[in-house]
């Protein structure tokens, strides 16, 4: 046992700790109530540990613990709560407040408590000398030249393209009812409203859902098997009321799956070097919608995001919220140091590879672009180069 272990005991059962053997290695300073205990702690050397009765005159041991933790000089002192009888509510409170340990005097030997305190002292004291690592926070700062360029380009393109945009908007409205634009939450350096022209029919989700369920009534056993990823229900959607989903639905053959759960399954499949599924054409996409998707015209409203300051012309593609939540590693989250953009490094590289690129490679390219915002690394001409590479990519047939 550690020599000269000084324990402060706050309570009325001092006799409980009258242990003769090995007493020379530890000593107890008894104090009857929390008021005297606070005065003692303010005017005397800090004890090695504190044992406190739950029942104290005027308050309780948890109340005293709350006071103790408001004084950070006592953070490394182990605190043990002692109760005469077991009370489940007291136990829950002690656990919730991260009290070091909780004992019931009627069923616990005092020697066991002293042994536990010795362990806690050896465990907690070294942390008081441990220095917290200094983190060099990487800070993003939008260069003035880039912001000026974004406003000038976005305003000019919107002005020139406005007659053509009016025709596209009219075509969208004539083909299907509903708003001509689509808003979703995206994550760049912050969460914002992301604008696109609508490329899908409105009001078709419920119909497709009904059809999918009707077609699946003969395949109930198939959808329950773990061998079929499409049959595994999304845990987030399962917690929501019937008819609600955590993210937009997509339909694959007779199956329906939300975007979030599809991406989770796709990542798991990639880890296991297995093929997930090939998505067929979504029947919700309109004829006009297919055209504006393949030509990237549906992205033009994002110029409004650029003018507002949510996005930049060149940057890393903003992610849906459910995708951003999955990026927890520092190496992956580094991409958010750069502004979200309409086009960027991985987009032009993706077009150059015919739309084939792994998630790892995409994240690597995002991080590579983010390097341009550390210190004085930003290059205005590098952005111009990516814009020039985007122009022929837009003329390439196909949607990637």
Image (tube, helix red, strand yellow):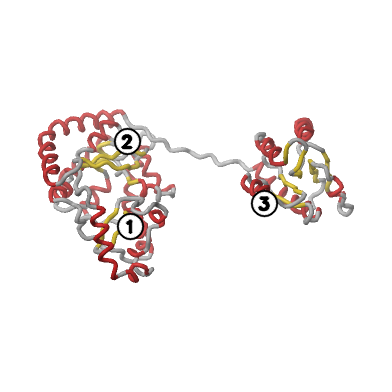
Residue 88's mark? 3
Q: Is residue 374 left or right of residue 300?
A: right
Q: Which mark is residue 378?
A: 2
Q: Residue at x 48, y 38 (%)?
A: 136
Q: Secondary structure at mark 2?
A: loop
Task: Locate residue 366, reporting x and y percent.
Answer: 33, 46
Q: CA distance from mark 1 to mark 2?
A: 36 Å
In the rendered image, residue 58, in percent from the top left (x then y), is placed at 75, 35
Q: Relative to residue 34, is residue 124 drawn left or right?
A: left
Residue 323: where, in percent of width, then height? 36, 49
Q: Nearer the viewer, residue 233 or 8?
A: 233
Q: Earlier in the sequence, mark 3 or mark 2?
A: 3
Q: CA distance from mark 3 to mark 2?
A: 59 Å
At horizontal 29% and vertical 44% (from top left) the residue drawn is 317
Q: Secondary structure at mark 1?
A: helix
Residue 118 appears in view: no
Q: Nearer the viewer, mark 3 or mark 1?
A: 3
Q: Nearer the viewer, mark 3 or mark 2?
A: 3
Binning the other alpha carbons within 10 Å of mark 2 as few (below 14), some (14 to 19) or many (20 upward) gives some
Q: Nearer the viewer, residue 266 or 230?
A: 230
**Of residues 317 and 297, which is closer to you in this image?**
297
């Amino acid at each position: 046992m550690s020599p000269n272990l000084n324990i402060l005991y706050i309570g009325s059962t001092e006799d409980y700790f009258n242990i003769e053997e090995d007493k020379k290695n530890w000593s107890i300073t008894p104090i009857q109530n929390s008021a005297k205990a606070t005065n003692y702690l303010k005017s005397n050397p800090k004890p090695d540990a504190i044992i406190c009765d739950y029942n104290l005159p005027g308050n309780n041991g948890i109340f005293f613990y709350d006071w103790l933790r408001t004084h950070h000089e006592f953070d490394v002192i182990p605190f043990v709560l002692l109760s005469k009888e077991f009370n489940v509510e007291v136990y829950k409170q002690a656990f919730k407040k991260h009290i070091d340990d909780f004992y019931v005097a009627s069923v616990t030997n005092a020697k066991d408590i002293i042994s536990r305190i010795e362990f806690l002292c050896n465990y907690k004291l070294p942390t008081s000398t441990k220095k917290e690592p200094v983190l060099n926070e990487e800070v993003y700062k939008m260069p003035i030249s880039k912001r000026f360029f974004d406003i000038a380009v976005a305003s000019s393109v919107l002005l020139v393209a406005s007659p053509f945009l009016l025709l596209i908007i009219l075509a969208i409205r004539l083909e299907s009812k509903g708003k001509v634009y689509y808003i979703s939450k995206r994550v760049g350096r912050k969460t914002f409203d992301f604008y696109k022209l609508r490329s899908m029919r409105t009001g078709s989700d419920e119909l497709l859902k009904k059809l999918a369920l009707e077609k699946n009534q003969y395949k109930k056993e198939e959808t329950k098997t773990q061998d079929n990823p499409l049959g595994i229900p999304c845990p987030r959607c399962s917690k929501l009321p019937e008819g609600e989903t955590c993210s937009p639905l997509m339909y694959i053959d007779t199956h329906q799956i939300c975007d979030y759960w599809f991406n989770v399954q796709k990542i798991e499949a990639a880890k296991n070097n297995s093929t997930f599924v090939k998505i067929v054409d979504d029947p919700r996409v309109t004829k006009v919608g297919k055209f504006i998707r393949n030509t990237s015209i549906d992205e033009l409203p994002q110029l409004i995001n650029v003018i507002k300051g949510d996005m930049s012309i060149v940057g890393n593609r903003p992610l849906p919220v459910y995708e951003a939540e999955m990026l927890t590693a520092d190496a992956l989250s580094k991409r958010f140091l750069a502004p979200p953009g309409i086009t960027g490094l991985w987009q032009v590289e993706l077009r150059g590879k015919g739309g084939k690129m792994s998630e790892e490679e995409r994240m690597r390219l995002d991080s590579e672009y983010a390097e341009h915002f550390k210190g004085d690394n930003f290059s205005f001409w590098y952005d111009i180069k990516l814009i020039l590479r985007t122009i022929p990519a837009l003329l390439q047939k196909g949607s990637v």
